[in-house]
Image (cartoon, rainbow, N blue to C red):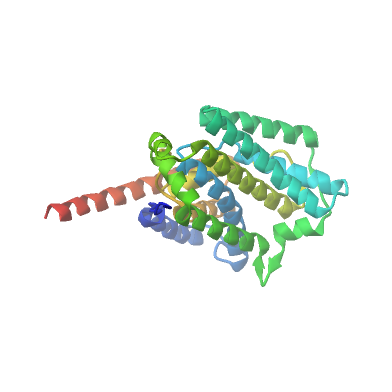
């Protein structure tokens, strides 16, 4: 008999994050010239889409109580693989497939090391991060690889019915993954393992299989994010995805999915991705240097998490009070 899937999603407990987003939009609309323009809103949505597709894969890993440090390097590797093949006359379909497969292979290695060999997830994915980064550097010799592919450029900047292709594609993938995590046996297994791996094993779940599939999906989604970045500039380099793993982790955490796994979900991840995208865009428009951007983003994320924690604690106290009465 197929188990009934009941998952706790962060979307129910992110009131503080919504307050933070509203406050952030008000502040940025006053402090950053052009922030409320339609052109800028489209830029926010593009950045949001790329971050969300990577953070969706990261959510799977964190729901399992693990992490994926290789996401940013996988993005760089997939961008390099795709643009090098295009620069050498390979058909766009094969170039894109190779870029996606490169991410899937790194994900497969992550899943094998974590799920089968039972290595520490941070150490294992940090090692594969170095592998992916090294391969990207070797492949491009540290240079920027340009492409003249109109298809790749369309992927990064093209529109369908007035909406960027990136947004359409991410929306489809996100809805699919939302269904997978909340309405399928695989989603049930992810939450079960994140709650207690030992209990999940005793109940008959093949945990190694779940780890492998989850990390492969995460690798593929990171690779797609890298291809999107390459499409925006119609070029790739070995640093194009640098730092995205930290942005993705922050997105998942402020969206309500904790490191210990088993609770949270993709609804919160989407809200977290929008928060970070608005924040980064506004800070950039205000003219802060990249160094200050990192510091201010960290401070804003910390404040938002604290507000959310306070609101949730207050809600729990009120709930206990109602039960006592």
- The front one of 4 and 136 is 4
Question: In the image as oriented, which residue stretches furthest toward the left?
Answer: 325
Q: Position of residue 148 (x, y in %)?
A: 84, 54
Q: Considering only vertical position in the picture, is 43 above or below 247?
A: below
- The front one of 278 and 323 is 323
Q: Position of residue 263 (x, y in %)?
A: 39, 46
Q: Quarter-wise, where is residue 175 in the image?
A: bottom right
- Residue 218 seen in the current view: yes
Q: Count the marks.
A: 0
Question: In the image as oriented, which residue stretches furthest toward the bottom?
Answer: 161
Q: Considering only vertical position in the picture, is 37 above or below 232?
A: below
- Residue 294 seen in the current view: no
Question: In the image as oriented, which residue stretches furthest toward the right?
Answer: 89
Who's the residue at 75% across and 42% down the image? 80
Which quarter of the image is occupied by the C terminus? bottom left
Q: Position of residue 295 (x, y in %)?
A: 51, 40
Q: Is residue 61 left or right of residue 226?
A: left
Q: Considering only vertical position in the picture, is 322 above or below 217?
A: below
Q: Is residue 311 left or right of residue 135?
A: left
Who's the residue at 68% across and 34% down the image? 132
Q: Position of residue 163 (x, y in %)?
A: 64, 68
Q: Quarter-wise, where is residue 48 in the image?
A: bottom right
């Amino acid at each position: 008999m197929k188990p009934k899937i009941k998952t706790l999603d962060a979307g129910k407990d992110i009131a503080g994050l919504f307050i933070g987003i509203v406050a952030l939009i008000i502040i940025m609309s006053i402090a950053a010239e052009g922030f409320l323009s339609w052109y800028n809103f489209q830029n926010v949505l593009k950045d949001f889409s790329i971050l969300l597709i990577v953070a969706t894969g990261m959510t799977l890993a964190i729901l399992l109580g693990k992490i994926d440090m290789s996401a940013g390097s996988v993005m760089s590797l997939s961008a390099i693989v795709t643009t090098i093949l295009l620069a050498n006359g390979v058909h766009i379909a094969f170039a894109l497939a190779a870029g996606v497969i490169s991410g899937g292979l790194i994900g497969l290695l992550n899943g094998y090391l974590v799920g089968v060999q039972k290595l520490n997830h941070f150490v294992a994915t940090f090692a594969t991060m170095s592998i992916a980064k090294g391969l990207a550097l070797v492949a491009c010799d540290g240079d920027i690889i340009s492409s003249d592919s109109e298809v790749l450029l369309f992927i990064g900047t093209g529109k369908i019915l007035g909406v960027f292709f990136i947004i359409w594609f991410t929306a489809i993938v996100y809805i699919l993954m939302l269904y997978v995590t909340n309405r399928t046996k695989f989603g049930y297994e992810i939450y079960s393992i994140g709650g207690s791996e030992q209990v999940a094993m005793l109940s008959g779940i093949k945990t190694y299989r779940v780890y492998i599939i989850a990390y492969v999906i995460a690798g593929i989604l990171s690779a797609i994010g890298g291809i999107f970045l390459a499409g925006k500039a119609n070029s790739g380099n070995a640093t194009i995805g640098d730092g995205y793993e930290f942005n993705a982790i922050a997105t998942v955490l402020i969206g309500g999915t904790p490191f210990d796994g088993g609770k949270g979900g993709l609804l919160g991840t989407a809200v977290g991705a929008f928060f970070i995208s608005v924040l980064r865009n506004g800070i950039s428009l205000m003219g802060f240097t990249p160094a200050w951007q990192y510091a201010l983003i960290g401070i804003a994320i910390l404040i938002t998490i604290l507000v959310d924690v306070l609101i949730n604690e207050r809600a729990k106290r009120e709930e206990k009070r109602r039960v006592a009465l």
